[in-house]
Image (spheres, rainbow, N blue to C red):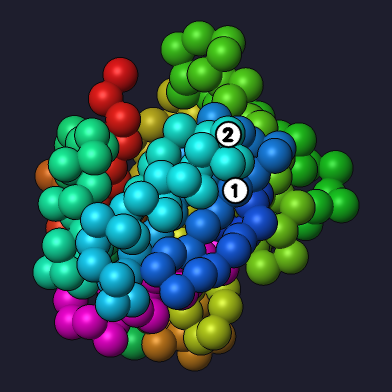
Amino acid sequence: MNDEALEELLQHELAYFTFGAHSKTTRCAWYLHSEALPLYRDCNRALHLRDDGRGPDRIVHEVMQHFHQVNRPPVVDCDAIAERQGLGAAFRRAGLMPASGSFAMLQYNSAVPPSPQKSSAVIQTISSFSPLIEDWIALNGSDEPDQPSRMFWIGIAREEALSRLCTLYMATINGVPAAACSLFYAHNKARIDSVITHPDFRRQGIASALVAQTVADALARKCKMIYLFSEADGMAESLYQKLGFRRAALNPFRRHMTPR
């Protein structure tokens, strides 16, 4: 991914996560903070870290001071530009460590929608005023093993459901909610997220049909970029690749946090 594409991606990411956070931009960083979702790191972090000429150590000091002032643990995403400027190394010297694991950015580059395997699922879009909105929200916590984790993801889904820029999709089998996802559209780009299948309905091609529909709708809007994120080399990435997505970048921004 070249620098121009990275800048466009970061701008789109910032716009997407304002569904649950407010943003602040400075010369050296873009910040996201959420009062409603204080534990959700994607909505409480710094990204687009840049050396404005003062040197990496001064930038790192300013960013760390910012998190101290807002009473949040520091979470920063270092991209390739930040690493070249020495900011990633400076954050690591300050005690922030890269998160474990890798994630892939996958992009759909064809002008033709994918052809998923046949599914008996009925796919529909859900508005925030729909009586089915609570079913869409509940699906986002359906695969969590315990109540705290379930409520955490349900809380995030509830905030996302209120976003005017997100289109919500739900698949049902015989009227029973089976899978969900969202499509964020802005500035001629589309981001697919919140892809979840209820454990009772997995391995039936439902997620494949759901994502294929969102891609078709994004293409109908003449999107010049359709993308999503997935755990690298996992089952989900394999599914998306079968639909025609291709890996555009591995860890386009590496998250750094204080070790637990």
Say which residue label 1 marks.
33
Crowd class of label 2 (few under 14; some 14 to 19; many from 20; radius 10 Å)? few
Q: Quadrant of residue 257?
A: top left
Numbered label attached to residue 140:
none
Tell me which segment is drawn in magenta: 1-16
| 92 left or right, relative to 209 | left
Q: Which of the two marks, 1 or 2, is nearer to us in this view?
A: 2
Residue 237, image x and y in percent?
A: 22, 50
Front residue of 89 and 165 = 89
Q: Quadrant of residue 56?
A: bottom left
Give amino acid for label 2: Asn
Residue 97 in view in this figure: yes
Establish if 5 lies above or below 162.
below
Label 2 sits on a secondary structure element that is: loop
Say which residue label 2 marks.
71
Residue 139, image x and y in percent?
A: 59, 32
Crowd class of label 1 (few under 14; some 14 to 19; many from 20; radius 10 Å)? many
Residue drawn at x 56%, y 20% as measured from the top left: 150
Give amino acid for label 1: His
